[in-house]
Image (tube, rainbow, N blue to C red):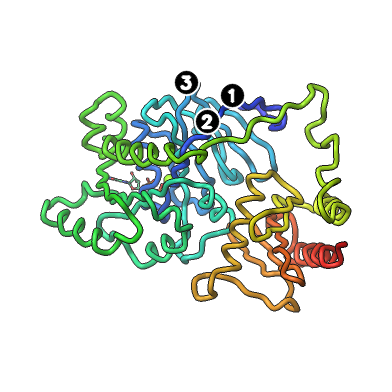
Amino acid sequence: MNARTLNLTSLKVEPSARRPVRVAVCGEVNSGKSSVINAMVRQVVTPDLFGQDHRPVFHIRHGSKPHALVNFDTGESELYDRIDRCPDLVHALSCEIVVNAPQLAGLELIEVSLPEDGMIPPPTQTLLANADLLVWTTIASQAWRLSERTLVARMPRSLHQRATLVVTRSDNIKSRDDLRRIHRRLVAETYEFFDDIVFLRAARKLIGASTESDLAFERSGGRELCGVIGEFAGEIAAIPGRLDLPAPRRRPATALPTEPATDPDAAAPHSATLRELREMAGGMNGLLSAGIAHDAGLNRLAGGSGLAESTAALCRDLWARPLAEGGIAVAPEDGPALIEMDGHYLLIQPAADGAGLLFLLCYSGKITRGLARNALLRMTRIWDRRR
Ligand SMILES: Nc1nc2c(ncn2[C@@H]2O[C@H](COP(=O)(O)OP(=O)(O)O)[C@@H](O)[C@H]2O)c(=O)[nH]1
Ligand SMILES: [Mg+2]
């Protein structure tokens, strides 16, 4: 066996002052996202999931000890020496792949598949809200369709800065004039979203050859892409505080990780109400994150702080957006807004007095819509009666 089940709470995280620059490599299915990553890594590192509907999110970064950690929807994780040793990715939510690729130092490449219906599922929106740079893959022969524009337009505005458009399968366009024409058209049609356009010629064979051959790395477009992304990443890294991680909190060796010794809300306003809401959330099945998003802050009720913060940001954004641009609106009597996609529900309900948006993010396979809706309604009622 080359896999072992891990208890994630026992994993020791290396304290590091800064996080990597997160590069979301996005595009529709088969548009060439994996090829972009493989061309940059100089080897085929992501599995071919041809014909598979469900695609886990792949995170790729440089490290001296290559391995792959697969996180399943059961909450368990398995460690492999290579991702292709994992027999089945159907129930995988995400895969963290570490490869020896010094040219990627300081970067985390995230492969994100987007549906063609133009709607970005809530977990993907959360991922994008946390990303620093966008790479969008479009196929040369049909580059930049309306469905792609719709998706990119719906991404957080911050990702429209320093974004890169990668035109994949450019090796299939034989005439230089045709390539020039495509380039000119793309500059005109995409300038509001992208700051650079790179042509990729990354047939699998050429990627294989690029491990050893600098010429193949050059010809595939991998080198140019590493240069462009490296430059944008350098600009992100130069923004004061942007990549800083919160200082690790020291815990006595004997402390249990799940139970804080003191009540975090003891001194906060409405501490008793928040405690009651946390207990309710703690009893729910399949809950990933819960909280109350305020204009500028957040009361976290369940789940990790990173996910709660980005989900809160997403809720505020959805709430503020006009309906025509994918925003949501509900009359309070209709109950919580529920957005269902890609195995998750995101439910949002405003407090009666407008003091915050209550939200739940859950796995749709583990809780019914009705139960999730009722739970959020009950929680909102408790919050509405707070003192
Ligand atoms: N010749 C060539 N094939 C490519 C290129 N980019 C992608 N492909 C092929 O197109 C198919 C889909 O690409 P893939 O990277 O798996 O797409 P994904 O689903 O977006 O990750 C695969 O067979 C790739 O080998 C390219 O630049 N040149
Ligand atoms: Mg892929």
For label 3, the SS is loop
Q: Residues within 10 Å of mark 1 (few under 14, many from 20)?
A: few
> Which is nearer the eye, 160 or 142?
160
Mark 3 or mark 2, which has the lower sequence index? 3
- Among the 4 quarters of the image, the one containing residue 247: top right
Rounded to the nearest angstrom, the CA distance separating label 2 from label 1 is 8 Å
Q: Is residue 315 above or below residue 37?
A: below
> In the displayed structure, would residue 247 be above or below residue 117?
above
Which mark is in front, 3 or 2? 3
- The answer to whether residue 277 is seen in the rendering is no
Q: Could you tell me residue 375's position as x and y percent? A: 80, 62
The quarter holding residue 233 reads top left
- Tell me the crowding category of disc 3: few under 14, some 14 to 19, or many 20 or more residues within 10 angstroms, Cα based: few
On screen, residue 359 versus residue 234, left or right, reads: right
Q: Earlier in the sequence, mark 1 or mark 3?
A: 1
If the image is split into quadrants, where does the N terminus sit? top right
Which residue is more in the foreground, 296 or 211?
Answer: 296
* Residue beneath disc 2: 85
Distance between the alpha carbons at the discs numbered 3 and 2: 19 Å
Residue 259 is situated, as x and y percent measured from the top left of the image, at: 83, 37
Q: In the image, what residue type sits under mark 3?
A: Ser
Identify the image quadrant of the C terminus.
bottom right
Whether pointer 1 and pointer 3 mark residues with C-beta atoms closer than 8 Å, the reply is no
Question: Is residue 192 among what the camera can see?
Answer: yes
Determine which of the numbered discs, if any, sits on residue 64 in the image: 3
Q: Amino acid at mark 1?
A: Asn
Q: Is residue 370 left or right of residue 348?
A: right
